[in-house]
Image (cartoon, rainbow, N blue to C red):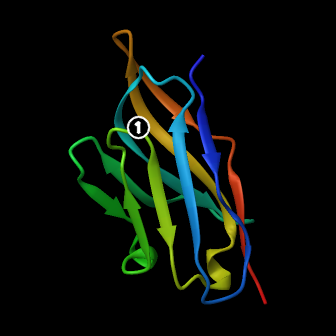
Amino acid sequence: QVQLMESGGGLVQPGGSLRLSCTPSVSTVRIGVIGWYRQAPGKARELVAEVNDAGNTRSGDSMKGRFTISGPGAENTAFLQMDSLQPEDTAVYYCHAWVTRMSQYLELWGQGTQVTVSS
């Protein structure tokens, strides 16, 4: 079974930075699209940023200019660099991907990693 392995996250002060990474647990999958969604308490899950295998990216409006996604590249890993973090960025961040494995097209979700922005 293919899973998404996330790392990064944690507690940071306002104005600080964090870097998230996400990669499939099986190296032989082909990533079509990979990125992150986030969900704050009492709010709907929203797109943070995603990148496809051609390197094209899209991101949520409130993240533009502050968050940068890169990957998947040869490492089959996506990275999310988050700068100028604000308390409203506090949420659980979920990695999400569409991958192909043995002719199967799979949608995957990570378990989520907590990002807390607080002084």
Q: In the picture provided, is 99 more to the left or to the right than 40?
A: left
Residue located 51% across and 39% down the image = 23
Q: Position of residue 72 (x, y in %)?
A: 36, 44
Label 1 amino acid?
Asn
Residue located 20% across and 44% down the image = 54
Q: In the picture provided, is 105 more to the left or to the right than 46?
A: left
Vertical position of residue 5 compared to residue 83: above or below:
above
Residue located 51% across and 79% down the image = 83
Q: Give neighbour class at mark 1: few <14, some 14-19, many 20+ (Cα, 10 Å).
A: some
**Residue found farthest to the front:** 74
Camera-side residue: 26 or 108? 26
Vertical position of residue 25 compared to residue 65: above or below:
above
Camera-side residue: 102 or 48? 102
Count the marks.
1
Q: Position of residue 118 (x, y in %)?
A: 76, 84
Q: Which residue is mark 1?
A: 76
Q: Quadrant of the C terminus?
A: bottom right
**Helix, strand or loop for disc 1:** loop
State the image quarter where residue 57 is shown: bottom left
Q: Position of residue 61 (x, y in %)?
A: 39, 74
Q: Position of residue 41 (x, y in %)?
A: 74, 65
Vertical position of residue 75 compared to residue 25: above or below:
below
Q: Quadrant of the N terminus?
A: top right
Q: In the picture provided, is 92 more to the left or to the right than 109?
A: right
Residue located 45% across and 78% down the image = 62
